[in-house]
Image (cartoon, rainbow, N blue to C red):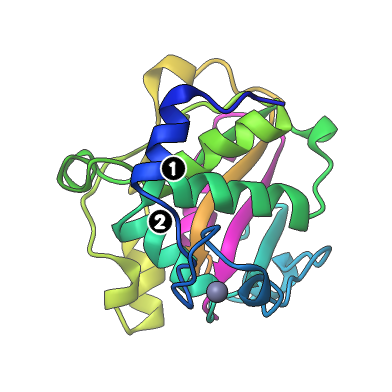
Amino acid sequence: MKKFSFFQFWQAFLFPDFCQHCQKLGPMLCESCYQLIEFFWQEDFSQLFAKNFDQVYFDQVRVMASFKQPLSSLIKALKYQHHSRAAKFLAQMLYFHVNINYQTIDIITFIPIHPQKRKKRGYNQSQLLAQELSVWSQKPCLKLLTKTKNTKPQAQITDKNQRLKRLNNSFAISPFYQNALFKQNILLIDDVITTGATSNSASQILKKNGVNSVIVLALASKS
Ligand SMILES: [Zn+2]
């Protein structure tokens, strides 16, 4: 167990946490709000998401729960404020509520965002999650992918076909890892999954570079 440091003590004292859903003072999600979440536990959703594509590149799609309250409040906190504490909290939830055999995973990675967007926001929420999950699972978190096109957020595009098309070739492998992916088993972190197009496109480039398997892991699904 990690010790509660002096810094953490003052941080908790000066900036106490409160439930992101009901505002009650305490953890980021209080016990009663936590109990409202219906976790999917073991289900693999790959068949369901595969229907959206002619070619499927991921091997499994694991989702923690539906994108609805109170989980969505916590995910909002990850995107807009309190991001580092929300990432810690949510990664812990991923670790304990989604049954993944981490012995079979070689590398944890994440859906990248375009450098311009990262600069504006200051961080990539999927990267924060992946890094925190790496602490729990003791598996390395590496930035395998880069985003080459600065695309509009998926949620702003209503036409499904357009969503799927525009993602083609929008990812690349980081040059540093190009020769290190052969036969690797990857856990790919996404925050919220809608059609699965982003994850499928990222899985495609990973497979092209010799990756053996890709398990997509998302906090929540909007579909
Ligand atoms: Zn609450």
Residue 104: which disc? none
Camera-side residue of 107 and 73: 73
Whether residue 54 appears in this view of the structure is no
163 relative to 127, above or below: below
Drawn side of residue 63 relative to residue 81, left or right: right
Give the residue type at disc 2: Leu
Q: Which residue is mark 1?
A: 12
Ligand 1 in which quarter: bottom right
Question: Which quadrant is the C terminus positioned in?
Answer: bottom right
Q: State the residue at coordinates (23%, 41%).
A: 122
Secondary structure at numbered mark 2: helix
Whether label 1 touches label 2, CB < 8 Å? no
Residue 78: which disc? 2
Drawn side of residue 59 relative to residue 140, left or right: right
Mark 2 surroundings: few (<14), some (14-19) or many (≥20) residues within 10 A: many
Drawn side of residue 210 relative to residue 60, left or right: left
Magenta-tinted stretch: 197-223
Q: Give the mark toward the camera: 1 or 2.
A: 1
Q: State the residue at coordinates (32%, 84%).
A: 158
Give the residue type at disc 1: Ala
The x, y position of residue 31, in whole percent, is 67, 69
Q: State the residue at coordinates (36%, 52%).
A: 82
The x, y position of residue 87, in whole percent, is 49, 47
Mark 1 surroundings: few (<14), some (14-19) or many (≥20) residues within 10 A: few
76 relative to 94, above or below: below
Q: Is residue 160 magenta?
A: no
Whether residue 64 appears in this view of the structure is yes
Which label's residue is closer to the chain start, 1 or 2? Answer: 1
